[in-house]
Amino acid sequence: RMRAELALQAAEAVEAADAAEAELAALRSAIDAQLDAQLGLMLVRRKVRPGDLVSQYASGREVGHAGEMSKSDFRAMIKTLGVRLAGEASDASSPAWRAAVDGLFDTLDPDRSGFLDSNEAIAALQSLRDAASAADEGRSNKARYAAAMRRKSERLVRRALSKPGQGAGGPEGSGSPQ
């Protein structure tokens, strides 16, 4: 009866581990598919300060837009940073990539002027960085949970499959995880 109970606990733990790993994979896929998340993660992981990017890419070549970032400046920044998108938008020369980058720019341009002034650009990039940092922390927490559930399930499976009188650690009977 005890072995049956252990087998049931092991099966439940395996299911929980599988579910946690599936949730983690879905979360990773969702992050990978979003340009804003990818850009934010790139800023976080490279420890890039938004103000530095804005001063580097806000060319203001257009008359009356000195120090502002245009869509073409934004595209150049994204391309130089090496932000990757999934599927057909992965190639920086593809129309899908350009549409994705321009779409993100449009969401960051609150006044729809076609330009981000330095304050708008810094605030937008900081917001993306903060959101990505929170998402990355959530992903890390989910990864730790999934790994812990997998270890627990493996421990329970070993215990359920061990011979009576034998510990989960094998013939030594230690019962402690490896």
Image (cartoon, rainbow, N blue to C red):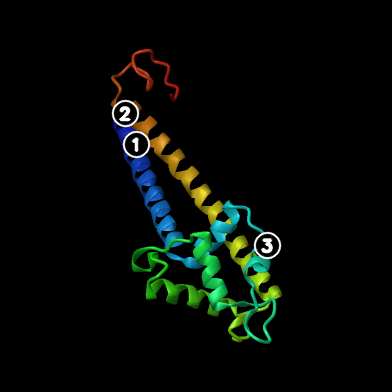
Residue at the disc numbered 2: 160
Left or right, 46 with respect to 16, comes to right
Q: Quadrant of residue 40?
A: bottom right
Question: Which of these two is toward me, 97 or 30?
Answer: 97
The label nearer to you, 3 versus 1, is 3
The secondary element bearing badge 3 is classed as: helix
Left or right, 93 with respect to 140, comes to left
Residue at the disc numbered 3: 52
When the figure is inspected, residue 37 is found, relative to residue 168, above or below; the finding is below
Q: Position of residue 156 (x, y in %)?
A: 37, 32
Left or right, 20 with respect to 128, comes to left
Q: Residue at x 40, y 70 (%)?
A: 93
The secondary element bearing badge 2 is classed as: helix
Left or right, 119 with respect to 83, comes to right
Amino acid type for the residue under numbered disc 2: Ala
When the figure is inspected, residue 133 is found, relative to residue 13, above or below; the finding is below
Separation of marks 1 and 2 at Cα, in angstroms: 7 Å
Report if the CB atoms under discs 1 and 2 are less than 8 Å apart: yes
Image quadrant in which the N terminus is located: top left
Categorize mark 2 by other alpha carbons within 10 Å: few (<14), some (14-19), many (20+): many
Question: Which of these two is toward me, 83 or 29?
Answer: 83
Which comes before the other along the chain, label 3 or label 2?
Answer: 3
Residue at the disc numbered 1: 10
Categorize mark 1 by other alpha carbons within 10 Å: few (<14), some (14-19), many (20+): many
